[in-house]
Amino acid sequence: MERHFDEELNELNKDILRMGALAEEAIHRSIDALQKRDSQMAKSLIADDVKIDELELAIDERCIDLIARHQPMAKDLRFITVGMKLNAELERIADIAVDIAQRSLELIDKPVLKPLIDIPKLAATAQKMVRMAIDSFVTGDVELAKKVMIGDSEADALRNNIQDELVKDYIAKDSSTSPRAVQLLLIARFLERICDHATNIAEDVIYMVEAKVVKHHPEKL
Amino acid sequence: MERHFDEELNELNKDILRMGALAEEAIHRSIDALQKRDSQMAKSLIADDVKIDELELAIDERCIDLIARHQPMAKDLRFITVGMKLNAELERIADIAVDIAQRSLELIDKPVLKPLIDIPKLAATAQKMVRMAIDSFVTGDVELAKKVMIGDSEADALRNNIQDELVKDYIAKDSSTSPRAVQLLLIARFLERICDHATNIAEDVIYMVEAKVVKHHPEKL
């Protein structure tokens, strides 16, 4: 017996919310492990990534199957294709959390360089942007999606400050600490990439709701 | 008058090939600018990215429109949805070439650190992987797609060597050169991300042709 199309869309929505929650949690855990210098936490995050990979594949299959069986038109078709894109973005966000955990493992057994500059702040921004982006998809809230896009410039500025400080105060000053400073610099860049993925999601949501392309055209916001 | 579906798929194929050629050219130009220390070349690459962005949007629209008007089943539907994914991967590859050009601009007006270690070799690997990935999509050649996936471990190893050398010989040794070494390290990581995108394409091609998921399951190769 075939379920109703709306019910299936609803299931898709729930899956994407679950994927979003997992991605968000992964960001949080990656930075938590770094701050607490907890290598076990970093390792379990890396191990758990397989669950996110599996959910990604299941969502992708669900989308293709929905299109093939129901041949949805305009609005629903855009919802499903945007859902597929979100799914890929979220899986990559989780992958980046794994990258951060791997960098953190390199740092955990070495002396603390100094409190992590603005990295926890950038991580909080990244997490918030991901949450807002998912919410904007689920509720179709374009204003919220626009806020994500604005948040991205703040994240860029924050990352630039972190990078400048690391280069100026450590990398260009003291060779004994610079390999550790490089790890922190990479972590800051990973976090910025997460913000970029959240921005991609927001752009796709605006496209889905308004059928207006803001991707590559921030002036249209 | 509506054109024949096969003809439209053929047009889509051509657009994706064009997108692939532009992405590949962008990688080449980014490293060429770095090697020749040609800031004009780097700047023109950055300016040209808008053309790739426009083509990405056009391809995306074409895919959605094809699905909506022709309601393709199984094989064709997978071809189109994979086409959408490739399109996104290629646009990001071009974006990364822009990132490389921006890092290169930082380096061009400073003294040469040393010949660029294995960065040109990694760039050549990245370019080759992108070309092979596109070819595997167009021809549906699964064996070629698998070669791309194998190439990715070689690229990882190459990047690790570059990173180790930069950290050991420069960053941990001489603070006066380490900011430049950090730029090179970032460029190596950008190139590795391009290889990752090529691998994503190859995984999608295998999925399209064999309806077999190798994503997250390299043991199934």
Image (cartoon, coloured by chain):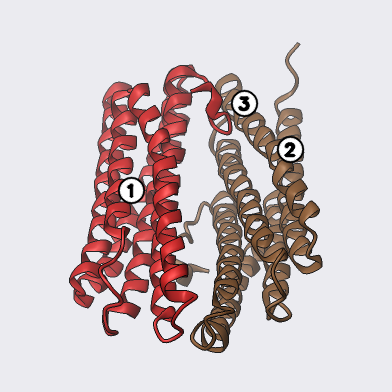
Chain colours: A red, B brown
| Tag in front: 1 or 3 | 1
On the same chain, marks 1 and 3? The answer is no
> Residue B135 in the image: x percent, y percent?
73, 55
Pointer 1 chain: A
Label 3 sits on residue? B66
Q: How crowded is mark 2: few (under 14 residues within 10 Å), some or many (20 or more)?
A: some
Element under disc 2? helix
Pointer 2 chain: B
Query: Which residue corresponds to the image point at 34% horizontal and 30% vertical from the top-left?
Result: A137
- Compared across the picture, whether B26 is left or right of B56 comes to right
Q: How many marks?
A: 3
- Quarter occupied by the N terminus of chain B: top right
> Residue A80 in the image: x percent, y percent?
42, 30
Task: Say if residue B195 shows up in the picture.
Answer: yes
Label 2 sits on residue? B15
| Tag in front: 3 or 2 | 2
Task: Say if residue A61 shows up in the picture.
Answer: no
Marks 1,2: beta carbons within 8 A: no
On the same chain, marks 3 and 2? The answer is yes
Label 1 sits on residue? A126
Query: Which residue corresponds to the image point at 62% horizontal and 72% vertical from the top-left?
Result: B151
